[in-house]
């Protein structure tokens, strides 16, 4: 037993540890940000000296803090400072919000909007250049689709950026003129032209942390740009890094990592270098995922590869040889096949065993893909909220893929049954583990549907494994960091509680950083 005296105790709870040793308890004692005792109220009180902080858990369920295994965290925060189109019910409503923003903005300045999804609009279609010209005639304007793989710009923006037929990812019409639709590399062109200042990035980051705490997220596995890492380091230095971060660097920066001689896991307790994020294909919503058969609603289109296969292979081989984890975005069945093959070829050369390479999203895998992932111990990093948003007979998946392929998407249950490690993230669409859990437990198809424990484990214990941190977090265990959350109900004993489940308290390193009863965030 740890001889340290507790500086905080949390008692009168229903603690579900997700540990294989002690599965349930009543109380937790914390010292120096770590868990030193788990047990009954009486056992924990013995660790608590006079004056120690004591927190009554009110008989509520306590579980490990959520680990969101796929985010664009800083971008989410910056987007929250822009025009938010996520809750719009129609194209007209979305354009109305952009028009209102334009009326309050000096002429010639950018109007940036984010998170539109035509799948939420009746008879929805992509936002067009003409739509933005009409609502923002005196401003350069961009509206980013929720997936991050497609954006629409207006005529003023096309002029401002200098978009033409040679611009990567810019869609052109029959005349060769830009249509305003920007895909994949084209989105990056627009993002670069509207890049926020460091101050705006930091403001957005702090807003994202507040959101994370309110939703029980204590760790993230983030996919960002190099400039984002600088913001994270500054926040850590200033004591404002309120979540634990595993940061995946863009594959374009691999050579810099190799030159510095750093590899996966380099960093501090709060901020570690993760892997390299690589893009194989696009997205189903943007009709750019690489498919073996065309999109059902676009018969001449089978998607695209973001990089040539040879380039993907070369990057994967270099990263693997240097001990750097691979996080490869692959969504369509053709994209998944290419991504798995790249990892296999790299491992054939290096012979590495504990690599923990990941396929991000993995939305349309075939049974042979799952078998190959199990054989090579790859991780399936998936987003259950996508099922909640777009699955079912009338959902976006069915529209894009047709009913047969739509019934085979995101087969979480089949992946677990094949003994492939499954981890859950949100991709910030939306950023909410409880919504993701609800989506997995109540999924449309048996091949997707998980038990409550399986869904929670994919957001906690399995997530820690994906970042090589299973020895320090992911379960409520002695010697691990004191990251845990208090929930409003107990869906393990009352599944109906999942409908209205919320986070009452979030604890990071033994500190209560969110308390719904007082809305205090210290």
Image (cartoon, rainbow, N blue to C red):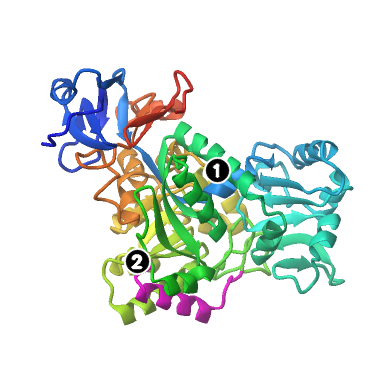
Q: Nearer the viewer, mark 2 or mark 1?
A: 1
Residue 66 at x, y percent in the picture: 38, 40
Of residues 37 and 341, the one nearer the viewer is 37
Which sits in the foreground, 442 or 512?
A: 512
Q: Main secondary structure of the magenta part?
A: helix
Residue 291: horizontal and vertical position, in percent? 55, 68
Residue named by callout 2: 373
Q: Magenta span covers which residues?
A: 304-324
Q: Is residue 315 magenta?
A: yes
Q: Secondary structure at mark 1?
A: helix
In the picture of the structure, the residue carrying the numbered disc 1 is: 205
Looking at the image, is 208 positioned above or below residue 288? above
Mark 2 or mark 1: whose residue is earlier in sequence: 1
Check the image and name the residue furthest to the front.
238
To which quarter of the image does residue 274 belong?
bottom left
Q: Residue at x 20, y 32 (%)?
A: 24
């Amino acid at each position: 037993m740890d001889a340290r005296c507790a500086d905080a105790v949390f008692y009168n709870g229903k603690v579900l540890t997700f540990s294989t040793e002690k599965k349930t308890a009543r109380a937790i004692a914390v010292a120096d940000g770590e868990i030193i005792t788990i047990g009954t109220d009486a056992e924990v009180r013995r660790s608590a000296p006079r004056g120690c902080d004591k927190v009554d858990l009110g008989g509520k369920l306590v579980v490990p803090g959520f680990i969101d295994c796929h985010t664009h965290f800083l971008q989410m925060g910056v987007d929250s400072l822009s025009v938010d189109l996520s809750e719009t019910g129609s194209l007209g409503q979305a354009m109305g919000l952009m028009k209102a923003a334009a009326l309050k903005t000096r002429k010639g300045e950018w109007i940036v909007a984010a998170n539109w999804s035509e799948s939420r609009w009746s008879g929805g279609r992509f936002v067009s250049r003409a739509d933005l010209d009409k609502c923002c005639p005196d401003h350069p304007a961009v509206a980013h689709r929720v997936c991050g793989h497609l954006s629409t710009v207006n005529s003023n923006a096309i002029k401002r950026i200098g978009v033409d037929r040679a611009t990567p990812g810019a869609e052109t019409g029959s005349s060769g003129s830009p249509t305003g639709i920007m895909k994949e590399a084209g989105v990056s062109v627009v993002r670069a032209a509207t890049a926020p200042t460091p101050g705006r990035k930091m403001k957005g980051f702090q807003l994202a942390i507040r959101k994370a705490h309110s939703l029980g997220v204590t760790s993230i596995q983030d996919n960002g740009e190099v400039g984002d890492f600088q913001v994270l380091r500054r926040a850590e230095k200033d004591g404002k890094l309120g979540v634990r971060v595993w940061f995946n660097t863009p594959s374009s920066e691999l050579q810099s990592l190799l030159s510095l001689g750093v590899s996966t896991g380099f960093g501090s307790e709060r901020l570690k270098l993760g892997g390299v994020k690589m893009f194989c294909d696009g997205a189903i919503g943007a009709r750019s995922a690489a498919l073996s058969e065309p999109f059902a609603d676009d018969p001449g289109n089978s998607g695209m590869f973001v990089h040539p296969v040879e380039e993907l292979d070369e990057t994967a081989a270099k990263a693997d040889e240097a001990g750097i984890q691979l996080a490869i975005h692959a969504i369509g069945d053709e994209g998944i096949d290419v991504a798995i093959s790249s990892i296999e070829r790299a491992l054939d050369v290096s012979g590495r065993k504990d690599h923990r390479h990941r396929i991000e999203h993995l939305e349309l895998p075939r049974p042979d893909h799952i078998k190959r992932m199990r054989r090579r111990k790859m991780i399936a990093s998936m987003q259950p909220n996508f099922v909640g948003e777009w699955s079912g007979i009338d959902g976006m998946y069915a529209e894009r893929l047709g009913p047969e392929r739509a019934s085979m998407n995101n087969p979480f249950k089949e992946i677990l049954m094949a003994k492939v490690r499954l981890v859950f993230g949100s991709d910030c669409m939306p950023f909410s583990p409880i919504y993701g859990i609800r989506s997995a437990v109540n999924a449309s198809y048996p091949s997707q549907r998980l038990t409550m424990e399986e869904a929670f484990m994919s957001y906690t214990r399995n997530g820690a494994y994906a970042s090589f941190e299973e020895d320090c977090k992911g379960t409520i265990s002695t010697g691990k960091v004191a990251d845990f959350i208090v929930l409003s109900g107990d869906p393990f004993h009352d599944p109906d509680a999942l409908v209205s489940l919320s986070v009452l308290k979030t604890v990071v390193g033994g500190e209560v950083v969110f308390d719904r009863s007082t809305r205090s965030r210290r």
